Amino acid sequence: MNQQEYDTMRQALEDVFATLYLVDTDTLSDAQRVQHQTALSTAYSAMVRMENTKLGELAEQRKQSLSRLMSGVRQLQKKLAKLKDTQEKLAEVANNLEVLAAVVRVFA
């Protein structure tokens, strides 16, 4: 499911939930109230599970991105540990700034 499909489905679920939520339950019979409560809780569960799945996918994507970036960060760490001069350290970080910027983008 791409982002547009997710957004469309999420909005549809939210609309269904909102419609059910706004029902005046005082006008319903006991059997209709049970039916309404079942529908309302099912719609809510669908929204929550959809969001949780999406969050899980995002977390997995971040894990994959971070594992690829980890080697670059480790290399930078090792290089910096060997350098004594501050200017050399700054130059090394400047030369590898894209690695740090990529880490920032993963968490953006």
Image (tube, rainbow, N blue to C red):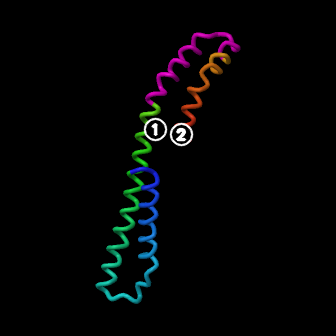
Identify the residue at image location x=41%, y=76%.
20
Residue 79 belongs to the span the image colors magenta = yes
Q: Which residue is mark 1?
A: 62
Q: Which element type, helix, strand or loop, lies under badge 1?
A: helix
User: Relative to residue 1, is residue 88 depicted above or below?
Assistant: above
86 inside magenta stretch:
yes
What amino acid type should be assigned to the residue bearing mark 2?
Phe
User: Please, which residue is most extreme toward the right here?
Assistant: 87
Q: Position of residue 44 (x, y in %)?
A: 39, 66
Image position, residue 59 (x, y; %):
43, 42
Q: Main secondary structure of the magenta part?
A: helix
Work out whether mark 2 precedes mark 1 in sequence or the reverse, and give the earlier one.
1
Q: Which residues are magenta?
A: 67-89
Q: Quadrant of residue 31?
A: bottom left
Q: Which residue is mark 2?
A: 107
Residue 103 position, x and y percent, is 54, 32
Residue in view at x 46 percent, y 38 percent: 62
Question: Closer to the camera, 85 or 100?
Answer: 100
For the C terminus, which image quadrant?
A: top right
Say which element carries label 2: loop
